[in-house]
Image (spheres, rainbow, N blue to C red):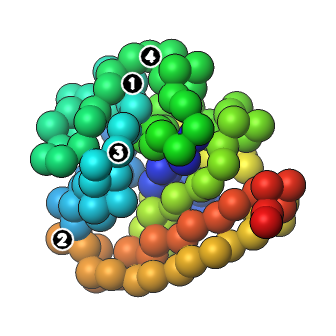
Amino acid sequence: MKAIVCVDDRNGMLFNHRRQSRDQAVTEKIREICQGKILWMNEYSFSLYGILQGVTVRCDNDFSVRADTGEFALIETEDPAKYSDQIEELILFCWNRTYPAQLFMTLDLSEWEQTEEMDFEGNSHKKITLKKYVPYRKRK
């Protein structure tokens, strides 16, 4: 699966049951990336991302088991490290700020090769950075 995760500068993902992924520009980028593809998510994410035009959104709390190779998974409420063996590509949206967080992404990015980096302006942040990674073990 191709994991999509939003993080702050300390890899924080969630604070007091509130997501860090709430930005209309990020939602649009996710829609562009997943256009014509399948995007898996749990019920929490479905409440915000359930309707993305041109994307086949599938809601299942066991999305990590259901997501197939080449399919996308939006991960907001669990540490993506839990699925590291299943992730073929990691797509990070970085806020370039530090927020309070209770849930952190603990993936060791030194084991991943960065393949892309792009800054764009969000609605809530002047600069959001999109980074893509692949695990070294799956490098071609």
Disc on res. 42 = 1
Disc 1 residue type (three-letter): Asn
Going 33% across and 81% down the picture, which residue do you hit? 120
Mark 1 / mark 3, whichever is N-terminal? 3
Q: Which quadrant of the figure has residue 11?
A: bottom right
**Mark carried by residue 37:** 3
- Which residue does the image show at 79% across and 55% down from the upper left? 138
Give the residue type that dot 4 points to: Asn
Residue 29: image location, x then y, percent = 29, 64
Which amino acid type corresponds to the residue marked 2 in the rendered image? Answer: Asn
How far apart are the alpha carbons under marks 2 and 4? 29 Å
Q: Are marks 2 and 1 in contact (CB under 8 Å)?
A: no
| Residue at which label 4 appears | 61
Of 137 and 26, which appears nearest the observer?
137
Q: Residue at x 40, y 32 (%)?
A: 40
Q: Where is mark 2, residue-wise?
A: 123
Q: Is 57 positioned to the left or the right of 9 in the image?
A: left
Task: Where is residue 61? Give x, y as percent.
Answer: 44, 16
Mark 1 or mark 4, earlier in chain: 1
Q: Name the residue type under label 3.
A: Lys
Mark 1: give few (<14), some (14-19) or many (20+) Cα within 10 Å: many
Look at discs 1 and 3 and give the one toward the viewer.
3
